[in-house]
Amino acid sequence: MSKLALVTGATAGIGEATAEVFAANGWNLIITGRRAERLENIAQSLTKQYSINVLPLAFDVRNYEEAASHLNGMGDEWKKVDVLVNNAGLAAGKDPIQEGKLDHWERMIDTNIKGLLYVTKTVVPWMLKVQKGHIINVGSIAGKEVYQNGNVYCATKHAVDALSRGMRLDLVSDNIKVTNIAPGLVETEFSIVRHDGDKTLADATYDGFTPLVGKDIADCILFAATRPAHVNVGDMLILPTAQANATTIKRD
């Protein structure tokens, strides 16, 4: 019997790569994101290529009513979620705290923390009913270290790290696994969003070394999700070989 994974933020980057890696391994999928047309195209492509079932749900995780309505509105067969991958997240801006833009702060807090909580709050009761499940939260090395001009983004990813540990404590008695995934530098549209669409600045982030790509992280997520029932990968830090910590990178 095929397992079922729910992946948020699946329209690009790590989320899209995760959906594809799970699909390639025979998992059925619920994929979410804000870009409805792109989400539908990804669903059709995965269904055709891997002969699995994919349900695309276009909504904004920052809106609790919208998230809960879409998820609770699914048929019961779609609520048998084995793995929830809380991937939706972003970085916006690299300003010192005194120059930070409120819009950037609110987007990061609302997506990275509140969006994760809204989806988890909706899905966990389904796992509790069957006394099993796995929540995989995509954090960041920024949840392990704070770096200059990272202030609010680092704070949101520290929150993801803390929430992962807190969820594990709250849910261990219910046989629900919780994993925190902490990537280093991954080349996706992440940097373009962070630099407000400035591709030149975004590309410079990855100059002179080989960064990770979405599939690298997706493979690690699948590894965590496919361990035996008695094994929980609690926390995983994944770095490109050229990166030693959040700010130390060997560039050519």
Image (tube, grey):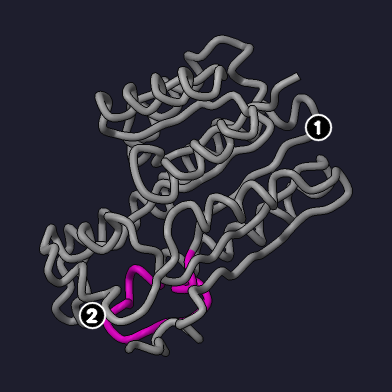
**How many residues crowd mark 2 within 10 Å: few (<14), some (14–19), many (20+)?**
few
Q: Is residue 204 magenta?
A: no
Extreme-top residue of the structure = 75
Percent of width and height locating residue 65: 38, 28
Q: Image point 63% across, 65% down: which residue?
A: 236
Earlier in the chain: of badge 1 and badge 2, it is 2
- Looking at the image, residue 127 sits to the left or right of residue 181; the answer is right
Q: Image point 54% across, 26% down: which residue?
A: 29
Percent of width and height locating residue 243: 46, 82
- Residue situated in front as seen by the camera: 151 or 247: 247
Extreme-right residue of the structure = 230
Q: Secondary structure at mark 2?
A: helix
Image vertical order of residue 118 relative to residue 248, above or below: above
Percent of width and height locating residue 247: 39, 86
Q: Image point 69% across, 52% down: which residue?
A: 224
Q: CA distance from mark 1 to mark 2?
A: 43 Å
Residue bearing mark 2: 97
- Looking at the image, residue 167 sits to the left or right of residue 243; the answer is right
Residue bearing mark 1: 131
> Magenta stretch?
140-154
- Residue situated in front as seen by the camera: 118 or 34: 34
- Amino acid under disc 1: Gln
Q: Secondary structure at mark 1?
A: loop
Image vertical order of residue 49 relative to residue 207, above or below: above
